[in-house]
Amino acid sequence: MKKILIITHSKDNQSIDLVSEALKQQDFLPIRLNTDLYPTDIQLIAEYIDGEQKLFLQDELGATHDLSSVKAIWYRRVRLGEKLKEIIEGKYLYAAIEETRRTFFGLLACLNLKAFTLGEREKLRYSEIKQLQLKVAESLGLNIPKTLFTNDVQAVQNFAQKCANGLITKMQTSFAIYEDGKENVVFTSDVTEESLAQLDGLKYCPMTFQEKIQKQIELRITIVGDQLFAAAVDSQVSEKSQTDWRKDGIGLLKSWVAYDLPADIQQKLLHFMDYFQLNYGAIDMIVTPENEYVFLEVNPAGEFFWLELFNPPGFAISKSIANVLIGKVLRRESITNC
């Protein structure tokens, strides 16, 4: 049976099961590599003798998988060495983590020589550059918000004067702040007059500022290969979700509906994916009350499972991911054989 390697972690969501089942239905064997368990609970072996390369995974259940014959890789999530800090003394921890990373990514580089990868690491890192996303989107004819990236307080105050409908701020990375054992996720927020006057800490941490776009609906457009799955939600029905729909993501879970995206917007988004050579991306857009489409960003490894599980039919995203992995549909790929 042909093998597909799924690179993720042990706490990943239902998307892994959805795609794995879609692969099995087409007689492909999904092999799950939980990176948070490496190197403490699983072993990777890369051996080179007399011109022969052998690559093996011994997983946490004790099974051994020959990775040399893997046909494709889904590079989804990486959390290497998460248990090391509980085991190794601080003075040795950096060395252990660094060797873990270099060994893992070295093996992955060797697999990439012959196996197709959905979500190549280098392409993901490049496509995550928010400034570049906006520039490319605009060059393709998509509308984007007025945007400022800075740690200069005066620049923010000047920029605010150019945004008649107000200002929002957000971070380029997704993270949470932990206080008293409680997780506080950092969401997109409105910038008030009061906060504009209290930006002293900005010089220590640059932030992203954008004009506030009036919303009729918000779109999540999941692109897999050349297939687009457009979903819409009215984020303005909940006070919590008006600035960032994720603040009431659970409340809106079943409110997403399939959306008929105009053909010209579809083509521009596909050209956007072509530019970054992405086979998967979750794109966020706003439709204004004047029916204008405004591009916000792409997450090259964004979530999709809630659309498929809670808003069927019409969102067979996992099947499309499986089809790209097995080479059944269009791929944007670059494989070097050696």
Image: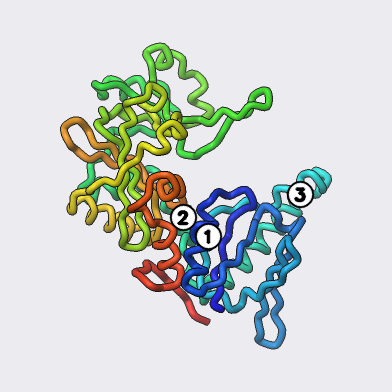
Q: Cα distance, mark 1 to mark 3? A: 22 Å
Image position, residue 62 (x, y; %)? 75, 66
Badge 1 marks a residue whose secondary structure is: strand
Seen as rendered, the residue at the extreme bottom is 50
Which is nearer the eye, 260 or 113? Answer: 260
Q: Is residue 251 visible?
A: yes
Identity of the residue drawn at 39% across and 27% down: 241
On the rendered structure, is 152 left or right of 221?
Answer: right
Image position, residue 7 (x, y; %)? 58, 60
Seen as rendered, the residue at the extreme front is 313
Q: Which residue carries the number 1 mark?
A: 75
Q: Which mark is residue 124?
A: 2
Q: Cα distance, mark 3 to mark 2? A: 26 Å
Badge 2 marks a residue whose secondary structure is: helix
Label 2: few (<14), some or many (≥20) within 10 Å?
Answer: many
Identity of the residue drawn at 53% across and 62% down: 20
Q: Earlier in the sequence, mark 3 or mark 2?
A: 3
Count of labels in the image: 3
On the rendered structure, is 66 left or right of 220?
Answer: right
Badge 3 marks a residue whose secondary structure is: helix
Residues at discs 2 and 1 in contact (Cβ within 8 Å): yes
Label 1: few (<14), some or many (≥20) within 10 Å?
Answer: some
Q: Nearer the viewer, mark 1 or mark 3?
A: 1
Image position, residue 224 (x, y; %)? 37, 59
Which of the colour schemes (rainbow, by chain, secondary structure, one colour) is used? rainbow
Label 3: few (<14), some or many (≥20) within 10 Å?
Answer: many
On the rendered structure, is 96 left or right of 178?
Answer: right
Q: Which mark is residue 84?
A: 3
Amino acid carrying label 2: it is: Leu
Q: Which mark is residue 266?
A: none
Tell me: residue 205, above or below residue 40.
above
